[in-house]
């Protein structure tokens, strides 16, 4: 009898500790679970290598191009079969990219992820994430060393990645961008309006 009581008490203590160490980043249950996974897992910084693949759109060329409007770097959060891609640099968002600071993706096959539908509004005004609901035409590829991401349906930008070390404080500040991205979007556009010459959008075909 004592043995069973001990096992029960140990299990209770384990569950209590697990719940105690979970952060409440978001009031959305599923979203909060994902963000807790991001908080506890590795973070990668991926830098654009001035190379993208374009399938052509309107007047833009087809083939390997340099996308001047690509994000200079992207942070990738990984937890189990889901990754979050976050663009932390101020001013880099644009109307063309859907006016948002992040995307969340679910693994479809080895190194390939599909874009999960998620709201661009604040935490209180957004519905919870359904990780079985996807946006067609958007894919990304990530293997810890490289990232190939389609932030628009017709172009894929190429990055090299490396794991970064960050404090708990820094992680929480970054995760806050996922939760309250509309506030950060306002700051981005305010900065963009006062620094219009800092951002380009030319897409040029690379030489063979």
Image (spheres, grey):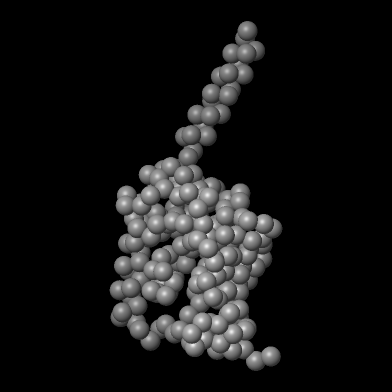
Q: Is residue 8 above or below residue 194?
A: above
Query: Which residue occupies the foreground of this view, 9 or 204?
Result: 204
Name, please, the residue furthest toward the bottom: 207
Query: Whole-percent x and y of residue 168?
Result: 48, 51
Q: Is residue 8 above or below residue 19?
A: above
At x 56%, y 19%, the residue is 9
Query: Whole-percent x and y of residue 68?
Result: 50, 83
Query: Which residue occupies the foreground of this view, 65 or 169?
Result: 65
- Judged left or right of residue 161, residue 19 is left
Q: Quadrant of the N terminus?
A: top right
Q: Quadrant of the C terminus?
A: bottom right
At x 48%, y 40%, the residue is 22
Count of numbered labels shown in the rendering = 0
**Residue 3, picture quadrant:** top right
Query: Whole-percent x and y of residue 119?
Result: 40, 57
Query: Whole-percent x and y of residue 37?
Result: 53, 47
Q: Is residue 37 above or below residue 75?
A: above
At x 54%, y 58%, the residue is 105
Q: Is residue 111 visible?
A: yes
Query: Which residue occupies the foreground of this view, 38 or 121?
Result: 121
Q: Is residue 68 visible?
A: no
At x 46%, y 44%, the residue is 30
- Judged left or right of residue 76, residue 88 is left
Query: Which residue occupies the foreground of this view, 160 or 201?
Result: 201
């Amino acid at each position: 009898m004592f043995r069973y009581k001990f096992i029960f008490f140990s299990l209770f203590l384990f569950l209590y500790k697990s719940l105690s160490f979970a952060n409440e980043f978001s009031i959305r249950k599923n979203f909060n679970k994902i963000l807790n996974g991001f908080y506890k897992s590795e973070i990668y910084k991926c830098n654009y290598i001035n190379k993208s693949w374009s399938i052509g759109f309107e007047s833009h060329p087809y083939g390997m191009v340099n996308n001047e409007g690509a994000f200079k770097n992207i942070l990738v959060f990984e937890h189990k079969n889901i990754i979050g891609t976050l663009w932390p640099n101020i001013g880099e968002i644009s109307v063309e990219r859907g006016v948002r600071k992040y995307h969340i993706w679910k693994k479809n096959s080895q190194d390939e992820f599909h874009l999960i539908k998620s709201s661009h509004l604040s935490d209180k005004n957004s519905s919870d994430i359904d990780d079985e609901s996807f946006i067609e035409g958007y894919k990304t590829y990530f293997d810890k060393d490289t990232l190939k991401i389609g932030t628009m349906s017709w172009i894929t930008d190429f990055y090299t990645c490396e794991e970064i070390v960050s404090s708990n404080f820094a992680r929480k500040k970054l995760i806050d961008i996922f939760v309250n991205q509309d506030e950060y979007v306002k700051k981005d556009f305010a900065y963009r309006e006062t620094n219009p010459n800092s951002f380009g959008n030319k897409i040029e075909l690379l030489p063979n």
